[in-house]
Image (cartoon, rainbow, N blue to C red):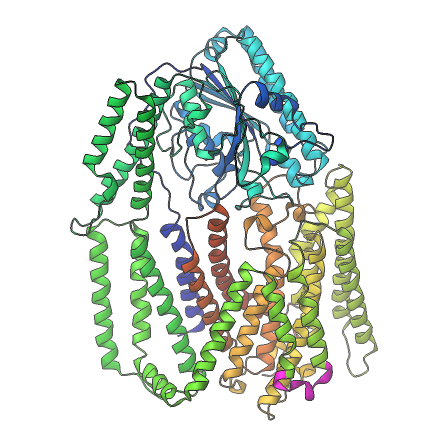
Amino acid sequence: MNMLIFIIAGLLVHCVFLASIFDIYFTSPLVHGMTPQRTPLPPPAKRLVLFVADGLRADTLYELDDNGTPQAPYLRNIIEYKGSWGVSHTHVPTESRPGHVALIAGFYEDVSAVAKGWKENPVEFDSVFNESKYTWSWGSPDILPMFAKGASGDHVYTYCYTAEKEDFGAQDATKLDTWVFDHVKNFFQAARSNQTLFSKVNEEKVVLFLHLLGIDTNGHAHRPNSREYKDNIRKVDEGINDIVSMLEDFYGNDGKTAFILTSDHGMTDWGSHGAGHPSETLTPLIAWGAGVNYPQKVTFQFFEDEFLKEWKLEKWKRLDVNQADIAPLMASLIGVPFPLNSVGILPLDYLNNSAHFKAESMFTNAVQILEQFKIKMTQKKETTLSFLFTPFQLLSDTEQINILRKARSYIHQEKYHEAVSLCKTLISLALEGLSYYHTYDRLFLGISVVMGFVGWTSYVILLIVKTHTSLTRSTDDKASTVLLLYGFAAIGVLIAFFLLIQTCPWTYYIYCLLPVPVWYAVVKEFRVIQDLASLLLVFPLGQSIGFLVAGALGIEILVFSFFYRSTLTVGLIAFAGWPLITRLWAQAKVTTLSWTLLCLLLAMFPLMPVVGREPNISLVTVAGLVILLISSFFLACLCKSKNKYVPKKDLTILLFQMLSIALSTYVVNSTHSSLHHKQGLPVINQIISWTTLASSLFVPLLSPTFFFQRLLSILLSLMSPYLLLSTGYEALFPLVLSGLMFSWIYMEKEALQHYDDSLKPKLAALNFSYTTDITQFRQLHLDDIRRSFFFVFFIVTAFFGTGNIASVNSFDPASIYCFLTVFNPFIMGSLLVWKIVIPFVLVSCAFEAVQVTTQLSSKSLFLIVLVISDLMALHFFFLVKDYGSWLDIGTSISHYVLVMVFTIFIMLLSGLAQLLTTKRIELWGRTKRHSM
């Protein structure tokens, strides 16, 4: 198969494997066609005020400062004297959009929704705002529009500041919240003199939504333990106090206003969010006003997190809820229908109302969730053959009718406690049934994807054996091949017909039909399989078992490194001892010593704290100075070289790269100093940063293609943007990694000579642009599996060694401050991804050099790498789960996505590494032509 076609096919196959978990585990839970359900009794409140303090952690709000003073005195007073409080438990991903959807619509978006859009709705959904008579909202342009555009009619009004105000480098991010409070006050001041507006705000079923982004912005910029973050909480506390007083005055203290304060998500100690750490998933919930229970004093209460004692709130009853439970609570307070797609369970302990009202509300909640279950069941029944359909046994049609009749009978008999208990049972069964039908096809799809995985990996192994070893001598049997083709085509038609009569989604066709051509390609090589089997039968059993154990151990070490970064340290220490085991130290003592020392030095990085938790700009400066010293030493060596003429243009490029390093070091220090003094991001620094980034992939192509000159040029060019994206010790990581890569190239040369003394490549004479002579390529041997494993190990180290963890929340927003400080998730995400990719590129270029040094075609080692990474991916596919703690769920998703992205990246990086190492652009005259 042509290499380009193989890479394209591989990319497509792996993209399908990557997308599969979102279809298997995390599809949208929404169904449509339900009837709105509302409590038949009059509600306690005419209006609801929802304060969402974006990025506010529960512990930071509830804790006392060193002097025993509350962070938010007004809200503390509410907890102790006026309302109910607790912790709202959010779900992964802990981002603003999914958090607000859970709060206001009552359901949890699937994980992929974060990538589908921040300001637009990937799917239509109902919300409390949509069900209200009028909703007025003030705040961020990233949040408010999605609820206005999702609403039916024109009754949801939004007032947003400009996106440019969301600046992490601004002098005072609390201005975002002050803007909201001021505009709410001005709005009600205008309502006094505007009869139409006055009439609207005095209607029933009105919602006022205040989205307060300042705390989140200060948390990203200064971290949650900072003075700025805590000062912002006090400002919000004062602002809420003012708004409550103003509204009570406006409405004449009619006692018909309910208030809720909560947050969409929390934040880690290092100022990020997105995963399932408790600091991200535990958010505050305080409710007071019309229809809300007063504080309930208790003598004892137990929670596993043991925060109560720390918060000095053990005497006041804590009422925890799931984040989606807040939507039915708001709907119940103002008497609007529960959002159609809500899976929230009404928290009755928050309600200060009659037992009859609570029972009716819970009955409405049960019917609303049961409606979703019935629609979901009908949909699945219609798309499944009758003899294959297995209904949810615990909630048959008869059981549904019996429970509803019994609950209604209890309400009529005023047995409200029994009615509530029965409704909770029905809700629990309906939610279980929803999950059952939502995951109905999971096993079927999972088997299809695993068959595709195993088939693809088997095909790659056979391709290696057939084209890059001398183990097989068989030729293809054309008659058998044609017969196989017809056979597999028939299987494909049968599968497609089976999916068609069940009206399955188009993605099912991809997952189920993909294994057909893959396994056809495998079975077509049955001659190779026969030869391989016969060779394995005569191979010593002990050695076969030894190779299998060693391979499995290697894969498990890579898998374990995703859970425990310290595993990489163990691996690197083992690598340090590799020359001693193979006796390479005897023939190359200096090379072996440098390899061992650099392995041990790199082994320290996975033991260090996660990047961003302890920023240290001085270490970034040290990294810049070290790379300048190294490049100066190389420049001096070039100038003193007597045997080699160095063109001035090559020296000019090197000097330009050194200047770029120096500028980058200065810009990092200057930017962080400016932001520390709250003077914003200097424009000149921003221009230098973007210019440096833009030139980082172009400048290496101007340098000579001799081994070490080109590799050093790539390192210098990529180090400039890496320094700009660094905040601490990770700036030193590419230096140590590159040193080890140079040493690895030398070690592989020695290992090749150790294997075959006739192969003696001289590194000084090697040139990347002379690597196209296929007659010099040799066949693979067992040591090449070790080389490929080293590459995959170094790729994994390139990610985890920089302090990242396999989670969205490991990335420090401060890393991008040299480029921009205004909130823009896609640009920020792209910059952070490029920071991660830079070490990958360094390793890939070194691997390209290893392939040239060991006289192997890039295709052969690349195929072995593909097998190793696919085995890892298959391992993680079985570990993906959507149950347990949200930290476990988020981690399992992250692991699988990362290893699949690694595999896809390796394919793309192979091409990028070849481009960076072999191509040269001549700006000063014609390119010198060499004979091949």
Q: Is residue 517 magenta?
A: no
Using the rendered image of the protein, determine whether residue 672 is visible from the camera's viewpoint: yes
Prevalent SS, magenta region? helix
Whether residue 325 is situated above or below residue 183 in the rendered picture: below
Q: Is residue 12 left or right of residue 669?
A: left
Using the rendered image of the protein, determine whether residue 926 is visible from the camera's viewpoint: no
- Asked which quadrant contains residue 420, the reply is top left
Magenta stretch: give its range. Answer: 581-590
Q: Is residue 195 left or right of residue 217?
A: left
Q: Nearer the viewer, residue 877 or 315?
A: 315
Residue 470 image position (x, y, % from top left): 43, 88
Task: Give the position of the N terminus as an image quadrant.
Answer: bottom left
- Work out which residue is located at the far front of the displayed protein and give it: 299
Which residue shows up at 32% across the image and 41% down it? 432
Residue 248 image position (x, y, % from top left): 56, 11
Whether residue 614 is situated above or below residue 867 in the rendered picture: above
Which residue shows up at 67% across the image and 34% down it? 229
Whether residue 931 is situated above or below residue 135 in the rendered picture: below
Q: Is residue 396 left or right of residue 595?
A: left
Q: Nearer the viewer, residue 315 or 240?
A: 315
- Asked which quadrant contains residue 577, the reply is bottom right
Whether residue 349 is situated above or below residue 803 in the rendered picture: above
